[in-house]
Image (spheres, rainbow, N blue to C red):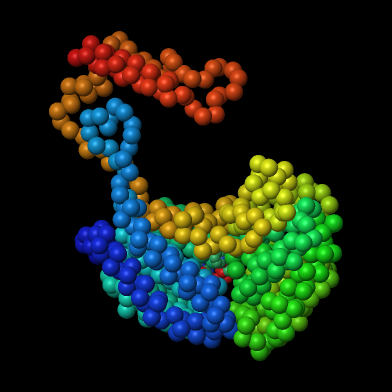
Amino acid sequence: MVDSFHNSKKTHSVQYRLNQLRNVYFALKDNGDEIAEALEKDFSRSASETRNLELGTSLTEVVHTMSSLHKWVQPDKVPDLPQTMTCPVYVEKIPLGVVLIISPFNYPLLLSVGAIIGALAAGNCVVFKPSELTPNFSKLFTEIMSAALDDDIFYVVNGGIQETTALLEQKFDKIMYTGNNMVGTIIAKKAAETLTPVLLELGGKSPAFVLEDVKDKDLATVARRIAWGRFTNAGQTCVAVDYVLVHETKKAALVKHLVAAVEETLFKDVDENDTNYTHIIHDRAFENLVKILKQSKGRVVTGGTHNAAAKYIAPTILDNVNWDDSTMRGEIFGPLLPIITYSNLDEALANIRERCDTPLAQYVFTSGNTNRNKNKELDTILTRIRSGATVINDVMMHVPLTSAPFGGIGNSGQGAYHGIYSFRAFSHERTTIEAAFWNEFAMKARYPPYNEDKDKLFVASQRRHNGKVWFGRTGDVPKNGPSSLFTIWTGIAGFSAVLFYVGAIL
Ligand code: NAD
């Protein structure tokens, strides 16, 4: 594949990339039911949930990429003067080469397709490693994608730790890893040995704040959204609500509505035989979640039941949880929702900063203004907590966006993808200058021997910085930069001075 990338120009052709993406589109469209069935076998996920959460969003992402690629590949013109007056200067978007994409089990279609089509759209060859934890899905996906794509640009390696470790011995031009932070660290260390860039999509504890100003009439909606954000896919969602931070004045009412949302509507009467509720992916994860539940000092207000044979854990809400609880030690990644009550927002934020900083997402519920500049508490939270994404008054709705970057910060990852951000993540932005020979007379000024005239040229070329500037030595620097009059005036003056001294030197 490496040879094929370097010896054949085919992935450089936009037409070729579009045709390959078209094949992916039809492969997904034609096999939607089979994909949903495979995931139902893998972890009892309902076919409807797969269609809603994964298939539709994946198809949208492919179509968006196909309809936008001709714009994304266009070189960006560089406006810098005076270089661009004598020759074209632009930024090309070139493929990186051969990239490795390692996917997790929890949304195996969505998280694989988004990454693969971004890499293909940017003109790369892809080695793809699906999760071994969804064997039915991974087998089917390998078959349909291998049939859809040319085998010299797309290759699947199935397997677990051993196979991934062997893969990491190869040199790639970029590695994208989606999964847990512990393995993310292994990947980053290994990649560092060969200076291979990485895109890491990791996890973390994403909080949902319910502020003091939330009105009673809004609480049922807040509770329903939080319950969906925690319990969908049995909590095995990277941007799930990991815990709730509710103001003490709203706690009792919120808990009542949360219990009602779970018991009366979203997960009414679910049990281990229910096909409307996903189960836990494997025994180790199940046992770990049960241990967290047993050790928790929180009060179970709904759920708490589990069945090892079915790897089923009921949607469980734990009230009166404190920061040292078992549920707060790491990302839960299962259907347990701890509720922490706060009275002082500053203290709550200090705890987040200290224990679970830089989450992948944060959710803030407020009945006040949703514009942070007009809502002091909201602004305080968004300023203090750096997160991969922020959603105000809802949860997880940033995931299907095709035109916004999806990615973490700090512990929750590095780099971002989706839509044009995937294209950029898998491209190199190469500055290109098409210089000419005719202007050599003007270039002479840069060559030694250096003398006083050349010093004057330097001063002239720096005129905008050293001579006339739009900011003083003290006071506030104007926020909007120089006025256009100033820019035009210094531009003309600076350029004439450069021409004058170039003339003098020649
Ligand atoms: P997983 O167990 O399916 O592992 C992910 C991938 O890592 C698999 O392909 C697996 O084979 C590989 N792997 C496992 N151990 C390895 C090792 N020692 N060396 C090399 N490769 C190895 O999934 P997971 O990691 O349990 O996924 C859940 C985690 O992923 C959660 O923390 C979740 O928040 C995070 N996640 C993040 C995103 C995101 O977009 N940021 C999306 C989904 C999941």
Examine the rendering and report whether any part of residue 72 can be seen: yes
- Image quadrant of residue 426? bottom left
Instruction: State the residue lying farthest toward the left.
Output: 438
Residue at 68% over, 76% down:
266
Q: Is residue 298 left or right of residue 372?
A: right
Q: Quick one: 176 or 36, which is closer to the camera?
A: 36
Q: Quadrant of residue 433?
A: top left
For residue 314, above or below residue 359? below
**Depth order, front residue of 403/116:** 403
Q: Which residue is pictured at 46% across the width and 24% down the height?
A: 483
Q: Is residue 213 left or right of residue 495?
A: right
Q: Nearer the viewer, residue 197 or 298?
A: 298
- The structure residue drawn at horizontal position 46% and vertical position 18%, both measured from the top left corner, is 469
Q: Quadrant of the C terminus?
A: top left
Image point (78%, 73%), residue name:
259
Inspect this view and state whether residue 101 appears: no
Which is more toward the observer, 169 or 200? 200
Q: Position of residue 267 (x, y in %)?
A: 69, 79
Measuring from the top left, give residue 39's x and y in whole percent. 52, 81
- Give the image location of residue 216, x and y in percent: 79, 60
Ligand 1, seen in the image, is in the quarter at bottom right
Q: Is residue 200 left or right of residue 476?
A: left
The spot of residue 29 in percent (x, y) is 40, 77
Q: Quadrant of residue 96?
A: bottom left
Position of the N terminus, as image quadrant, is bottom left
Q: How many marks?
A: 0
Is the residue 399 above or below the residue 52 in the image? Answer: above
